[in-house]
Image (cartoon, grey):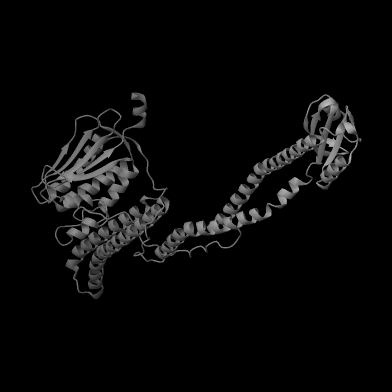
Amino acid sequence: MPDRSGRAGSPTMSLPVVGTSPPAAPRRGGLGRTLTARAVLVTCAVALVSVLVTAIVAVPLAIRGAERRDQEALAAQARLAAEVLRTRLDRGRTADEERLIQQLRNQDIDAYLIRRGAVDRPGLPPRVVQRIGQGRNVSVRRVVNGERALVEGRALPNGNGVVLSRPSANGLWARVLLSLWLPLLAGLAAGVVAGLLLARRLARPIRVAATAAARLRAGDRAVRVPVESPDEVADLAEALNGLAGALATSEGRQREFLLSVSHELRTPLTAIRGYAEALADGVLGADDTVDTGRTMLAEAQHLDRLIGDLLALARLEAADFPLEPVPVDLTQLAVDAEPTWSGRCAAVGVPFRLETPGQPVPAYTDPGRIRQVLDGLLENALRVVPPGSPVVLAVRAGAGPASGGELEVRDGGPGFTDDDLAVAFERGALHQRYRGVRKVGSGLGLALAAGLVRRLGGEIAAGHAPEGGAAFTVRLPGDPYLARTSA
């Protein structure tokens, strides 16, 4: 996984997809499938429920109020009749009584005259007659002549009295309910209008966002959605705008990365093709065959490493990426790597130094993958460090027995600027900056190292080394079994 494109990489992004399925057709039609239809239905339902609840509460009150007014009116007439007939009841039936009774009948009121505790005609409940005869007034609802009626009676001296009755209003409930059709229709109409206005207000920003998303899907990265209230709509607009910006940035970096990778692929392929054509044309003699073969082999190995890194990066985010974490002694891992790298560094005049705490440093990780990360970081360091400047591999223990440990690779090379550190693990970023300035790799190594470390639950950081170059620190988690036992 060599790299150090000035020790570089590029942002995490996938390679172009060769084929994509056509977008699914949007759902259309059906009552209640759109936001507008649902808003109208909800507001109509609310209006209908409001009218019905109002009717259930108001109609009984209205009926009781009407009956109370009828009772009060009948009571007033009963008092008036009693005053008129106060001095006439003891004289027998007179013409004045007949005129009064006839006037009351014209108003649908029956009049009963009681003389000395006896009623002039049947129909009144005996209990009413009895109370009038006892000198007590009556204000009740009773059955008179077979139908329920309002009854008002006024007692006069000597067991005399006047009782008026009026039938209770029949079908009052039905009449009131039938009169509700107009307010119900008005409420439903208001609900439809309110629902349409509300739905248009709610659906408009959603339609705008859907249109913007469709344009994004079609490849228009310049699309932006206006940010407006309410907060939820503003959040949606900001999210889509952020997505459009991120896609534009990601695709720009992807194009730069693909250009960089295509250059890296073309370089060894050009060398291999040139030597192969020379061999095929017989230009090279027998004495040059060995050197030519070595050159072609080196270029083929470089090409193989580049393709391997590309495949590893493509698989890194997959759920089935093979990882086998086990308890590992980081000190022993570094000691095992020393012979290989001390020999390679000595061959180019670079001193190699190993720093360990002199005791085991336990961690929980995949030893093969961490050795891959370590080899890649050392490969990057060796590529850029000048002869005489050191390459250091250091091991440090964590704060506790179960807190894991750290591996650090430092060098005395040209190092990084602070701006470089911010993009050190982005795929191809430093490769673009330093191509043609210093020795660079494929631009994939640091991105691959960062992805591997993160998949293993660790952290990786880039910084400045005291030797004057770059420092890469890999922090790995501790053994979970030790964490449980120490707890």
The part of the image, by quadrant, that contains residue 242 is bottom left
Left/right of residue 147 with respect to residue 448 in the rendered view: right
Determine whether 142 is above or below 377 in the image.
Answer: above
Residue 79 visible within the image: yes
- The residue shown at (79%, 26%) is 136
Q: Position of residue 413 (x, y in %)?
A: 12, 50
Between 96 and 255, the one nearer to me in the picture: 96
Q: Quadrant of the C terminus?
A: top left
Residue 388 image offset from top left, x and y in percent: 8, 48
The image shows a total of numbered marks equal to 0
Q: Locate residue 352, reporting x and y percent.
A: 14, 43
Judge whether 41 appears above or below 56 on screen: below
Indicate the position of residue 16 as horizontal and vertical percent values. Answer: 37, 62
User: Residue 211 falls in which quadrant of the image?
Assistant: bottom left
Above or below residue 240? Residue 288 is: below
| Residue toward you, 418 or 340 | 418
Residue closest to the eye, 332 or 10 = 10
Q: Is residue 389 left or right of residue 58?
A: left
Q: Residue at x 39, y 52 (%)?
A: 235
**Residue nearest the observer in this picture, 418 or 398:** 418
Q: Is residue 441 visible?
A: no
The image quarter containing residue 194 is bottom right
The residue sitting at the left extreme is 388
